Image (cartoon, helix red, strand yellow):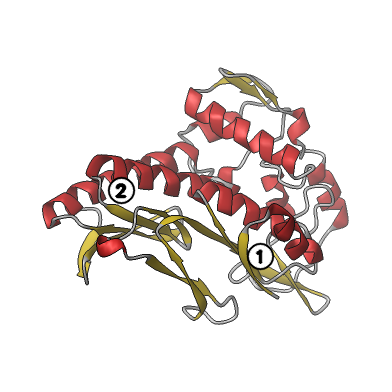
Amino acid sequence: MDFTLDRKEQSWIARFSAMASPCEAHLSGSSRSEAERLASLAVSETRRIEKKYSRYRDDNVVYAINNADGSDVEIDIETFQLLQFAGQCYELSNGLFDITSGVLRAAWRFDGSEALPDQAKIDEVLERVGWLNVKLTEKQITLLSGMEIDFGGIGKEYAVDRVAQNMFGEGQCAVMINFGGDIRVISPQSHDRSWVIGIEDPGLEDTALGQVELKNGAVATSGDARRFCLYNGKRLGHILNPKTGWPITDAPRSVTVIGGTCVEAGLLSTLAMLQGPGAEQFLREQDTQYHCVW
């Protein structure tokens, strides 16, 4: 088996690693054999999505798109829908959420060290950023030469939702999926019990600031707990402004959002971080449950 399976109270917990994260699938109300079957489905679907959309591979559609040198690349309906959603995110965020901005990693290192930004390098990379330069149809995508896409901002959340929906549909038992803190819950546990989810303290690893109780819904967190740099004595998180090429400043240390789906919660938490000091005002305007740590 490509996972471990343990029993905790009345739930089975399958654990495995994927998408650079520890992954867990919690199942309530199933037998061990059923839990093993559903966990295998979860791992298989997660691996499929990771293989298809990881930018670290050289054998998938993302690699083909990023290395097409201005040529058209054929895509399937799943990829089109993800790209279409990315375009909607770009519009909703007034250009702050841009999946072509991943190339800016060439100008920054977020390993906790002191940053030595090269403005000329940032300006050069910015010329290859811009969703408005992407041509997208249901069957193909075309980028300008030198541009890239990166599903890092929505891919893991998409996987969480897909895996949760597949497991619930196959087993009709209560499910909680947790991929590195991106969480989706479908159905309460036995005896109508909520799933209890901790909110991590960005300053203290494995320490909870509080908790959320869910019977259906999702939780996602964006923040600088693990990926940041130091600049002139100030801590800068890894979330970059695609218009300036610089990290967002004066943003919360972390933003946790409770939403209907993991994709929704993840998008809102990232968009809030992109507002910098206006994060909480943005979240209040969305009329959503949230928790910010400054």
Residue 91 vertical position relative to residue 239 in the rendered view, above or below: above
49 relative position to 86: left or right: left
Q: Residue at x 70, y 35 (%)?
A: 147
Name the residue tied to disc 1: 110
Say which element carries label 2: helix
Q: Nearer the viewer, residue 254 or 188?
A: 188
Residue 43 is marked as 2
The answer to which of 121 and 10 lies nearer the viewer is 10
Residue under the point 52% across and 77% down? 210
Q: Secondary structure at mark 1?
A: loop
Q: Is residue 50 left or right of residue 222?
A: left
Q: Amino acid at mark 2?
A: Val
Report which quarter residue 108 is drawn in. bottom right
Residue 15 on image: x %, y %: 30, 61
Picture layout, residue 168 above or below residue 32: above
Residue in the picture at 49% in, 81% down: 207
Camera-side residue: 193 or 120?
A: 193
Q: Amino acid at mark 1?
A: Phe
The mark lying in front, picked from 1 and 2, is 2
Spatial distance from mark 1 to mark 2, Cα to Cα? 29 Å
Which residue is found at the position 18% from the left and 47% from the top? 37
In the image, is residue 207 above or below residue 43?
below
- Is residue 242 among what the camera can see? yes
Check the image and report above or below for 67 versus 158: above
Q: Is residue 196 left or right of residue 150?
A: left
In this picture, residue 235 sits left or right of residue 85: right
Residue 13 position by quadrant = bottom left
